[in-house]
Amino acid sequence: MATTGVRVPELVGLSVPDARMVAHQLGIVVASKDLDGPSLGALTWPGTWVVVAQEPACGAVVARGGYVRIEFRRLPDEGGGAGDREPRDPLPRPQAIEEAAEPTKERREPHPGRRVR
């Protein structure tokens, strides 16, 4: 059974999760330079990590299921938060909460026979 080759995509500049997803869709595996070392997920958590080098280079052909070894760097944290991904919207005013809880009042239309001045 012949193994088909896969052209290696450009991974440099992508975040590590994006690089893994792109490679997975093509049928290849992204790993750190040390294949016997800790997993890529363990090396790149927490924080945002970006691919800075890859081996083999973009355009090379590897066997389906083959490896692309990457080097990566952590981006500095923006804002120094706890790393949660929830948006930071301001809390609503207490008055707005009370107004939203009140039942809506139906708007009264004038009686058809009356004129509104």
Image: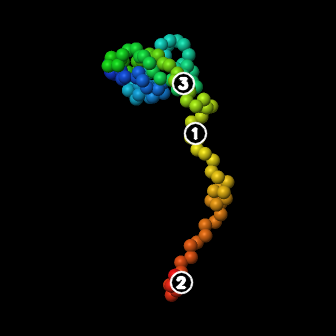
Q: Earlier in the sequence, mark 1 or mark 2?
A: 1
**Which residue does the numbered mark 2 point to in the structure image?**
111
The quarter holding residue 94 reads bottom right
Q: Residue at x 48, y 13 (%)?
A: 33
Q: Residue at x 52, y 26 (%)?
A: 48
The label number, if any, that marks residue 76 in the structure image: 3
Q: Earlier in the sequence, mark 3 or mark 1?
A: 3
The residue under label 1 is which amino acid type? Glu
User: Pointers 3 and 2 in contact (CB under 8 A)?
Assistant: no
The residue under label 2 is which amino acid type? His
Q: CA distance from mark 3 to mark 1?
A: 19 Å
From the viewer's perspective, is the residue at label 3 or at label 1 nearer?
3
Q: Residue at x 56, y 40 (%)?
A: 87
Q: What x and y, as percent, mark residue 17?
A: 48, 27
Q: Earlier in the sequence, mark 3 or mark 2?
A: 3
Q: Is residue 113 visible?
A: yes
**Which residue does the numbered mark 1 point to in the structure image?**
86
Instruction: Count neighbours of disc 1 (C-alpha within 10 A) and say few if under 14, some if 14 to 19, many if 20 or more.
Output: few
Q: Residue at x 58, y 31 (%)?
A: 79
Depth check, front residue: 3 or 110: 110
Q: CA distance from mark 3 to mark 2?
A: 66 Å
Q: What x and y, as percent, mark residue 13?
A: 42, 24
